[in-house]
Amino acid sequence: MKEIQYTILVPAYNEEETVNAFYDAITPVMEKIDETYEVIFINDGSRDHTAELLDQLAEKDKHIKVVHFSRNFGQQAAFNAGFHYAQGNAVIMMDCDLQDPVEVVPEMIAKWKEGYDVVHGKRTIRKGESFFKKITSTLYLKILKKITGLNIPKNVGEFKLFDRKVVDAILTMPEKNLYLRGLTAWMGYKQTFVEFERQERVAGETKFNFKKLVKTAINGIVADSTYPLTLSMKVGVMGSVLSSIAFIVFIVLACCKIVLPLTAWLFPTITLVASILCILQGCTNIYLTQIYKEVKSRPVYLVRETKNID
Ligand code: UDP
Ligand code: MG
């Protein structure tokens, strides 16, 4: 057991308008719980006054710890760093903008004390999110679930609690491309939910522009699936079957003395050549898939608990 009971982990990128509000909101909640805690802010290369404000908070309150990144590396990298520095027996990840209500933290802790290893914050209402964002994120989740085969829960974001053993398990994974939603589903353990109403940002704007969202979405697929690598083989096999059928039809027509123009033969010929190239690429991809899995070196299994074993 660690000396510190709870770590609140907060990535912050250009959050000068929200850091103080977050501090003012979380402090009374954690003080009321009356156990040891720390709040770790990961300043993800902010270019506004976030760094100075965080340093001031750290100066006046020893519960506040700050890690300043050398530049903007993204929210998932900030979580990665946070897991590394966190000392708590339970680690709670939160947005800096109070979209994740601080009152939910004690509920999450209560679930953890019941014995759950992962407690997800589940959004019942999603204020401050555009219709476009809700639709695209629902669609993306469907695609992600289909191609990864993982049971990734709906309406769940990065607001969660992890037990120490979950954080330690993540730290043993050598993979660099961390995508928490997929990884949490992959890891298993005892998981549960706490429902909450997602609030609007207390101030400022979302730090996820379209480019960042697309990058995160692609990372999410690549982190937990090698499906795109299988496409080449599938397209190749389909193309060669279709072009072979076309050849057979053309030969039958020729036998029936129906003469097709020479250019008509070009279509199945090109398709067949392209399909053979796809199949050859597909063969390379089978090895690439294996190499990718080996390089990622995820553990073969994770243990939740043992009995009568030292
Ligand atoms: N964030 C970060 N690095 C980034 C983008 C965002 O650390 O490159 C932080 C941000 O400061 C916030 C959290 O990640 O604390 C979630 O970001 P945001 O609230 O902008 O996302 P949204 O809630 O709109 O999805
Ligand atoms: Mg937010």
Image (tube, rainbow, N blue to C red):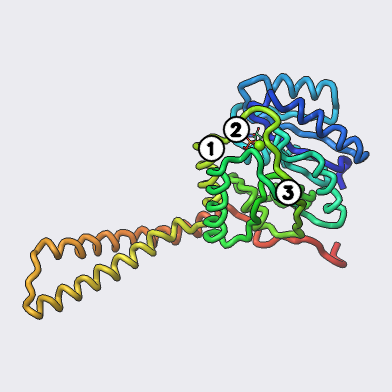
Q: Position of residue 177 (x, y in %)?
A: 58, 45
At horizontal 73% and vertical 40% (from top left) the residue drawn is: 100
Closer to the N terminus: mark 1 or mark 2? Answer: 2
Nearer to us in this view, 132 or 98: 132
Disc 1 and disc 2 in contact, CB within 8 angstroms: yes
Distance Cα–Cα, label 2 vs label 3:
20 Å
Closer to the N terminus: mark 2 or mark 3? Answer: 3
At horizontal 68% and vertical 62% (from top left) the residue drawn is: 301
Q: Is residue 61 above or below residue 301?
A: above
At horizontal 34% and vertical 67% (from top left) the residue drawn is: 237
Closer to the N terminus: mark 3 or mark 1? Answer: 3
Nearer to us in this view, 243 or 171: 243
Disc 2 and disc 3 in contact, CB within 8 angstroms: no
- Report the quarter where the C terminus lies: bottom right
Indicate left or right for 273 with 103 as reference: left
Mark 1 highlights which residue? Answer: 212
* Callout 3: SS: strand
- Amino acid at pointer 2: Lys
Indicate left or right for 159 with 138 as reference: right
Q: Position of residue 168 (x, y in %)?
A: 74, 49
At horizontal 93% and vertical 39% (from top left) the residue drawn is: 34
Q: Is mark 1 within 8 Å of ligand 1?
A: yes
Q: Mark on residue 121?
A: 3
Nearer to us in this view, 120 or 56: 120
Q: Is mark 3 within 8 Å of ligand 1?
A: no
* Callout 1: SS: helix
Q: Mark on residue 207?
A: 2
The reply to whether residue 249 is visible in this rendering is: yes
- Amino acid at pointer 3: Gly
